[in-house]
Image (tube, grey):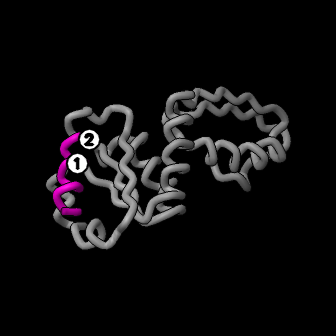
């Protein structure tokens, strides 16, 4: 349903995805409140996800380059990359092999931050960090 089709008589329910960006919810709620007779919102955004996003934002403010490790189909990882792209140069990769595609960026960056989606295995993260170190030698 398009927003212009809402009437003041509309009853609207919102359930957020657990890995959704908090900012998206904050942006849409005022519009829905203004256009609904009744609004029920169930915020299921995970506290761990929110904290990870906030920590990644803080790290990105100190970095020339952020590397986000995790699946391209992972909502959690994709949202992290979207958030960070607004702060600094950001690359979303799934494995350390993809670092070869951005090796020039890595070499010219003095401070590199690494974050990962919640479901990214630790050994994948460790391999990415190790390979970044090899480029910086």
Is 48 on the left-hand or right-hand side of 103? right
Dot label at residue 113: none
Q: Please provide the residue range marked out in magenta.
A: 126-137
Residue 75, percent from left and from top:
41, 42
Residue 79, percent from left and from top:
46, 47
Tell me the CA gap for discs 2 and 1: 5 Å
Q: Residue at x 54, y 58 (%)?
A: 61
Q: Residue at x 81, y 46 (%)?
A: 35
Asked whether the beta carbons under mark 2 and mark 1 sit within 8 Å of each other, the answer is yes
Is 118 on the left-hand or right-hand side of 25? left
Residue 26, percent from left and from top:
70, 44
Of 15 and 118, nearer the camera is 118
Reading the image, the residue beneath label 2 is 125
Q: Main secondary structure of the magenta part?
A: helix
Q: Residue at x 50, y 34 (%)?
A: 49
Q: Residues within 10 Å of mark 1 (few under 14, many from 20)?
A: many
Q: Is residue 133 magenta?
A: yes
Is 133 on the left-hand or right-hand side of 111? left
* Residue 107 found in image quarter: bottom left
Quadrant assignment for the C terminus: bottom left
Residue 18, percent from left and from top:
51, 31
Q: Residue at x 56, y 43 (%)?
A: 54
- Farthest residue in the front direction? 137
Reading the image, the residue beneath label 1 is 128
Rendered position, 36 above or below 99: above
Of 3 and 78, nearer the camera is 78
Q: Residues within 10 Å of mark 2 (few under 14, many from 20)?
A: many
Callout 1 secondary element: helix
């Amino acid at each position: 349903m398009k927003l212009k089709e809402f009437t003041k008589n509309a009853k609207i329910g919102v359930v957020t995805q657990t890995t959704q960006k908090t900012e998206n919810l904050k942006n849409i709620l005022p519009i829905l409140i203004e256009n609904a007779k009744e609004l029920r919102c169930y915020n299921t955004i995970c506290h761990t996800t929110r904290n990870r996003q906030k920590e990644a934002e803080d790290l990105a403010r100190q970095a020339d380059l952020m590397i986000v490790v995790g699946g391209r189909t992972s909502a959690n990882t994709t949202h992290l990359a979207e958030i960070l792209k607004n702060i600094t140069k950001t690359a979303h990769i799934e494995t350390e092999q993809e670092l070869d595609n951005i090796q020039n960026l890595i070499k010219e960056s003095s401070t590199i931050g690494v974050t990962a989606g919640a479901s990214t295995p630790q050994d994948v993260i460790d391999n990415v960090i190790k390979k970044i170190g090899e480029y910086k030698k």
